[in-house]
Amino acid sequence: MKSVINILDLSVEELQKLIDTANDIIKNPTKYSEICKGKKLATLFFEPSTRTRLSFEAAMYELGGNVLSMSDAGTSSAAKGESVADTAKVISCYADIIAMRHPKEGAPLVAAMNADIPVINAGDGGHNHPTQTLADLLTIYREKGGFDNLTVGFCGDLKFGRTVHSLIEALSRYKNIKFVLISPEELKLPSYIKKDIIQKNNFEYLQTTDLQSVMPELDILYMTRVQRERFFNEADYLRLKDSYILTPEKLQNAKKDLSILHPLPRVNEISVAIDKDERACYFKQVLYGKYMRMALILMLLEVL
């Protein structure tokens, strides 16, 4: 039995299998419409979510399965003090697979260690969000045809952005990637990620506070919001939240085939004027996330 807590739990070969399966689902949806009949997914969300929870639930329904949903921790036994370990054991009696989001880093790992069924980490604090990374990877693959030889810019909150951390980990296993890290000084990429992933693997990288100066060299621009919920100090949030707002003017020197990604939700860091630009990929990214979650459910339930 396999769980996915970190994107590195999936080998490069497994990632390619997921991408191939997702692409086949896109081409042949009816082939998969009853493949999980009789199977149940439990979505345990101890933190607010729209896209991720509904994406998992839509994924299971489109595979012909059923969903048991817990979207409010205040109405669950967690409010009575039940541990994550006990919750995982209990849910194992009802479902075939769990998708869990939790504000505490490491909680899905604890669940996986105690569950009798596969657990998928749907986001744990500022730590990991592997299925968002799967959505990102399928988007890049369909836009660029692969992952090698790309210059990837990450802009905004690189300190707390779990989607950024997971995607850097995933891309570090491909060839000749250049990372461009664009953020305020206060929101720079954590040093352990820079040291243990980028520098350890000898990837070229650039850190800057100036988006405009690096725009012409980017193949991918991964925008992120400055997250209010990750700040202890409201004044710091208000001072930094508008640091980087992407507008059509800022794209004037960008490549014609630039791909703009964003894990969403968007606040105001990407102007709505960019939504009609053919380089905007963030709504396609949402759809691709559903297909990759379908592929992951199939892999973990071993029904393919």
Image (cartoon, rainbow, N blue to C red):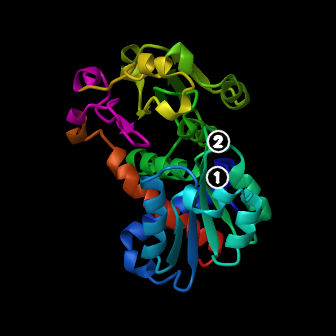
Q: Is residue 166 left or right of residue 200?
A: left
Residue 115 percent across, percent down from the top left: 75, 67
Residue 272 percent across, percent down from the top left: 23, 36
Boundaries of the magenta span: 248-273
| Residue 2 visible in this rendered orientation of the protein | no
Residue 278 lies, with reference to residue 62, above or below; the image says above
Q: Is residue 110 left or right of residue 45?
A: right
Q: Is residue 272 left or right of residue 108?
A: left
Three-letter amino acid code of the residue under disc 2: Arg
Residue 166 percent across, percent down from the top left: 60, 41
Q: What residue is disc 2 on? A: 173
| Residue 248 visible in this rendered orientation of the protein | yes
195 part of magenta stretch: no
Determine contact: label 1, label 2, CB under 8 Å.
yes
Q: What residue is disc 1 on? A: 12
Q: Main secondary structure of the magenta part?
A: loop
Residue 246 percent across, percent down from the top left: 31, 26
State the residue at coordinates (54%, 50%).
47
Q: Nearer the viewer, residue 31 or 245?
A: 245
State the residue at coordinates (63%, 76%).
95
- Measure the alpha-carbon separation of dots 1 and 2: 7 Å
Residue 299 lies, with reference to residue 282, above or below; the image says below
